Amino acid sequence: MSSSHNHHAHTDSKLLGRAFFLIAGFMVVELVAGIATNALVLIADAGHMFLDATALGLSWWAARISARGFDHKLSYGYHRFQILAAFTNGLTLVALVIWIAIEAVTRLASPEQMSSELAFIVATIGFIVNIIAFKWLHDASNSTNVRSAALHVLGDLLGSVAAMLAAAAVYLFGWLYADPILALLIAVILSRGAYRVIKESAHILLEGVPDGVDLAEIKQVLSHTVPGVVGIHHVHAWALTDQKPLLTLHAQVEEKAHVQDIISQIKSVLTNKFGIDHSTIQIEHGSCPDEDDGHHHA
């Protein structure tokens, strides 16, 4: 399992790095083209790409650093950096949504002319660049970190479509309002994605119980299927990343029970039935020593 995870981490890192250089490179092209054509839509999209490049760079760094393993300072390793990166990316998406909304309202109040033919060509190239980057990230593993980076690129893909449509509307009909209206639509789509990324990563950072892990069901199954177990309590589950759930529990067992066998059976059930392969189990004969401090069973 760990070798497959390391393979995923390495693939993620490589694809994120590749996408970062592609997006960052085109960002410069788009910025220069935006200034040359007086196309605010391209300058805005270049700003969008700058945020994307930052997000991708951050995610790439996180994927690389999380492969370091653990040390005496971070005993669980560096995996949480990926979640921290996803959370930061989510916040930058929120900032981007606010910026797009303000920019769109400003342009509705006072639209500006642009060199629509060149703007359309550059926007089309940007669209192709984003499709390539999104395809790379889509092929990577489904971690929150990569998903948040893909969301940034998806947002930029919509930005490129908006720039293409805006340039086409100006060229064909001289209609300058297409750009701000489409930009507001993008802001709405992006805000939903940003909310999802922030919610997922904040839940992990706050040591929330991982999705799909039911503590009541774990207590029930272990109490009834592992011979020698009298009761299960003090069950706590959290996650390093969305793919690395961890669990601790106390198991009250019969006096004559074979402790090692029970631990092996509990771990086997946790791994095979619940997909939790990192657990710490405290075995108890009689009352729980942690009850003396006034806490009740959890």
Image (tube, rainbow, N blue to C red):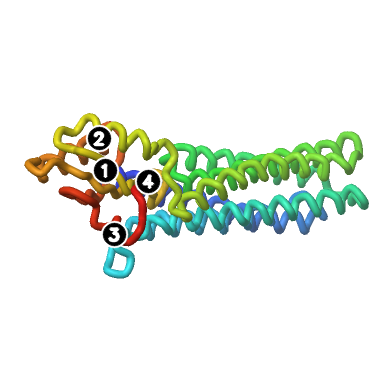
Crowd class of label 2 (few under 14; some 14 to 19; many from 20; radius 10 Å): many
The alpha-carbon separation of the residues under discs 3 and 1 comes to 30 Å
Q: Which mark is residue 11?
A: 4
The mark closer to the camera, 4 or 3, is 3
The mark closer to the camera, 4 or 2, is 2
Q: Name the residue: 74% across, 53% down.
A: 98
Q: Which mark is residue 141?
A: none
Dot 2 amino acid type? Ser
Dot 3 amino acid type? Asp
Q: Is residue 154 above or below residue 48?
A: above
The alpha-carbon separation of the residues under discs 2 and 3 comes to 23 Å
Q: Earlier in the sequence, mark 4 or mark 3?
A: 4
The mark closer to the camera, 1 or 4, is 1
Residue designated by label 1: 277
Q: Name the residue: 81% across, 37% down.
A: 168
Do tag 4 and tag 2 residues touch (Cβ < 8 Å)?
no
Q: Secondary structure at mark 2?
A: helix
Q: Secondary structure at mark 3?
A: helix
**Residue 250 image offset from top left, x and y in percent:** 25, 48
Q: Which mark is residue 292?
A: 3
